[in-house]
Amino acid sequence: MKSKNEFFVLSLSLLLLAACSPDKPKNLPYLGIKDVTANGDTLFHTIPPFAFLDQDSALITEADFEGKVYITDFFFTSCPSICPKMKSQMIRIHDEFLDDDRLVLLSHTIDPENDSVAVLKAYADALDIKTSKWHMVTGDKRAIYDMANKYLVSVAEDNQAPGGFVHGGHFILIDTQKRIRGYYDGTKEDEVNQLMEDVTFLLDGKKGN
Amino acid sequence: MEKKGISLKTIILFSWPVLLILGLLIWRFSSKGENRAGKKLYQMYCSNCHMEKGEGLRNLIPSLENSSLIDQSPEKLVCLIRNGLDPENPTAQNPNIKLVMPAHPTLTANEITSLIQYLQQSWDSQKPLISFQTVENEINNCP
């Protein structure tokens, strides 16, 4: 009888221990096509150099993201469909990581003809965001659309779409080595929660709370 | 045989209070004045920009929480919803940005009535709920 009780207590405490123990160390995938060099090293897909103008007319290049984790997306200021939701979610990330310089946000307009620096400035001001934390960039249309391809997302002009453009609502997570580590639906709160957790993992090597 | 008769009696005897409670519960949760049609229309046409709880988006998209239109003059919402906002209109939130309130010309008077009533119910309008007749009159006089 006693041994039965002991067994019960032991299994109960094991169960409790399992429930309380921290999550297994997790890792994030490396996305995109991988290559293998002659000596067997894996080459991951990385984001190539770029140069765009942000809302303060500053030239923003890959050098500004050196050693930083960043989240990027594609949008346009007159977008009536998913952009407001994406921006409201990006604001959450902006506010959450406002004082952490290791994370930067980068939003590309896919409508550079209308979205000049002045328009981006008005948009950024209306959202009350800090430029050093969140760059909204414009530039050569071909260059922007090419960059979307490098981030492996699709954007296109389409007269039938609301506002004249189609684009997915993805937030793309890029690590300090310019590798793609995740895609998240920027219109969904729970996916953005996951994204913030993954950012914390990349920055600190542990899951956020 | 007798046993079966008793159990049937018992079922009848005990089932009516259960049914009564069930009915009350259904009534409580289905007809508490909730404007389902209006809520559905809000989620379909408005929540994308004004957000699920009407909080808007900082200074880009107006919040509905302290809207004087909803509070004081809901009838003015009729043409606003149907025609949207002209980007050249100085009342547009930010003239530099061409993000405008889209027009909804296909919404019927009935739908607009449900929608505005939902706005009034959700954000405590001082005015009585708008009537179908008022909405129809406003539509006929929209610019």
Image: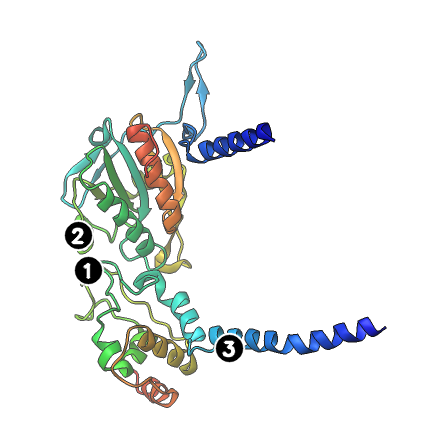
Q: Amino acid at mark 3?
A: Trp
Element marked by disc 2: loop
Mark 2 touches mark 1? (CB < 8 Å): yes
Q: Give coordinates of residue B112: x percent, y percent.
A: 38, 78
Q: Which residue is mark 1?
A: B59
Left or right of residue B95: residue B137: right
Counting other residues with Cα less than 10 Å from the Cα at mark 2, is it few (<14), some (14-19), or many (20 or more)? few
Q: Give coordinates of residue B88: x percent, y percent.
A: 20, 68
In the current view of this chain or complex, which residue is farthest to the top?
Answer: A39
Left or right of residue B27: residue B39: left
**Earlier residue among tags 3 and 1:** 3
Q: Which residue is mark 3?
A: B27
Q: Where is residue A66, by image quadrant?
A: top left
Q: Where is residue A103, by image quadrant?
A: top left
Q: Amino acid at mark 1?
A: Asn
In the rendered picture of this protein, how many numbered marks are placed on residues?
Answer: 3
Who's the residue at 40% across and 39% down the image? A183
Q: Give coordinates of residue A12: x percent, y percent.
A: 51, 34
Mark 2 touches mark 3? (CB < 8 Å): no
- Looking at the image, which is closer to me, B8 or B42? B8
Q: Is residue B55 visible?
A: yes
Q: Is residue A138 visible?
A: no
Which chain does the residue under circle 2 lie in?
A
